Image: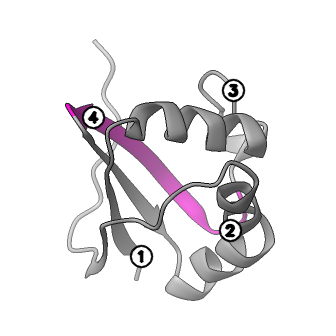
Amino acid sequence: MAEVVVIEFAEPNALEIYKRVNKELGWEGVPDSTAWPAGMLSHVSGEKGDKLIVVEVWESQAAQGEFMTSQLGPAFAAVSAPKPSRIEWFNSVMDVHSHSH
């Protein structure tokens, strides 16, 4: 069963940090799913004031851990990103499919 992770940053420049991390990952603009790391099923982010939240669905926590070790952790270090203020895992209970208007 898929697992959902919520990652939150509470920093005055959280959105700018997010953009710099995405650039470091080669995800400038909106990456299509072929650019996603192995095991990532979906990714969405949102911001409000000094908070930025990322919600991802992964095949497993191990797959996200591999991405963290091999790509995301080094990208965080490269841009001197602060540690997230929250990381919380949830069990997926329903698959929701994209719907475009």
Residue at position x 72%, y 34% in the image: 23
**Mark 3 to mark 1: distance in Å?**
26 Å
Among the two numbered marks 3 and 1 on one chain, the one whose residue lies closer to the N terminus: 1
Q: Which of marks 1 and 4 is in front?
A: 4
Among the two numbered marks 2 and 4 on one chain, the one whose residue lies closer to the N terminus: 4
**36 in relation to 27, above or below:** below
Question: What amino acid is labelled 2 in the image?
Answer: Gly
Q: Position of residue 51 (x, y in %)?
A: 25, 43
Residue at position x 20%, y 31% in the image: 49
In depth, the one of 56 and 16 nearer the eye is 16
**For residue 47, which numbered disc appears in the image?**
4
Q: Position of residue 42 (x, y in %)?
A: 47, 51
**For residue 73, which numbered disc appears in the image?**
2
Residue under label 1, please give it: 2
**Mark 2 to mark 4: distance in Å?**
21 Å
Residues drawn in magenta = 37-49
Q: Residues within 10 Å of mark 3 (few under 14, many from 20)?
A: few
